[in-house]
Image (tube, helix red, strand yellow):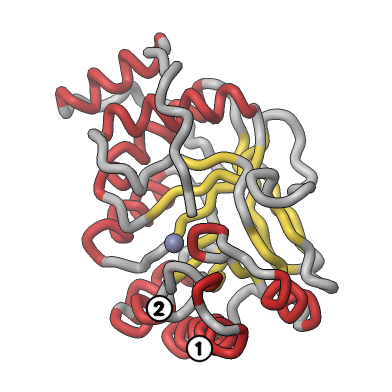
Amino acid sequence: MILETEKSGVTRRDFAAGAAAALLAGSPLPAQAALGTARVISVDTVGGPRFGIKSYPGTLPLADGELVLTFDDGPLPATTGPVLDALARDNVRATFFLIGRNARANPTFVRRIAAAGHTLANHTMNHPWTLRQRSFEAGMKDILDGQDAIEQAAGQKIAPFFRFPGFADTPELLAELSRRNIAVWGADLWASDWNEMTPEAQLQLITTRVVKARKGIVLLHDTRRQTAAMLPTFLSALNQRGFRVVHAVPA
Ligand SMILES: [Zn+2]
């Protein structure tokens, strides 16, 4: 379950005002060098490590200003397409936690994500809400079915990275994932893009949080229109503020 508690205190930042105005006006942003992908971090998944301080004690070893971008719940053509276009324009690589049934329905997009060099990861077959309301056996089946569906769509193995829907883990599932050497991903900060808002509000919210956190695993959803709409401006904002994107791959 995700409770939103940080709605207050979002202030309009100087860059965000300009960027949001440009976004709303539909005018192009000034030309600048692409954000790019600064480095690759190899993640050793032996023993099933857990990352993301929203749920777990530790996270990836990131330096100040370093962000790992993650996108959940796709692929959905209407929104995943623009997200991939924006990432490609800025030469940014991310990790996509796909839903198996969406991967099965949209295999072209799964292969497109892989071909662009992004990391493919698993977010269950059917996105149960939540796995805490399922038996261990049913939960494990949904996790493994998701992995199979994504791998069949991709035509290749995916990273042994898993994220629980709603971050709703259980001790039994965590133990089994640990036994299977599958890393469990939470997040260090998130866009709260499960809440409906304008692209301008989304941009302000996530940028404010990134500036405050300074580093970490960022959770977004490539299934959300507001996220797809603001992503080009968000990437420009990260670039302007000196943030660097780190691409996570399995060791
Ligand atoms: Zn999800």
Residue 199 visible: yes
- Of labels 2 and 1, earlier in sequence is 2
Crowding around mark 1 (Cα neighbors within 10 Å: few <14, some 14 to 19, many 20+) is: some
**Residue at x-position 25% and y-position 48%:** 225
Q: Which residue is mark 2?
A: 126
> Above or below — where is 95 with respect to 122?
above
Q: Residue 153 at x, y = what percent?
A: 42, 85
Residue type (three-letter) at the residue carrying disc 2? Asn
Q: Nearer the viewer, residue 1 or 219?
A: 1
**Residue at x-position 37% and y-position 44%:** 193
Crowding around mark 2 (Cα neighbors within 10 Å: few <14, some 14 to 19, many 20+) is: some
Q: Which residue is mark 1?
A: 145
**Residue at x-position 48% and y-position 49%:** 2
Q: Cβ–Cβ below 8 Å for labels 2 and 1?
A: yes
215 vs 57, left or right, is left
Q: Residue 218 at x, y = what percent?
A: 55, 44
189 vs 24, left or right, is right
Residue 111 visible: no
Q: Does the beta carbon of the residue at mark 1 sit less than 8 Å from ligand 1? A: no
Q: Where, by quadrant of the figure, is residue 141 drawn?
A: bottom right
Measure how far apart labels 2 and 1 are at the Cα level: 9 Å
Q: Nearer the viewer, residue 155 or 133?
A: 133
Q: Residue 136 at x, y = what percent?
A: 61, 84
Secondary structure, mark 1, is helix
Residue type (three-letter) at the residue carrying disc 1? Asp
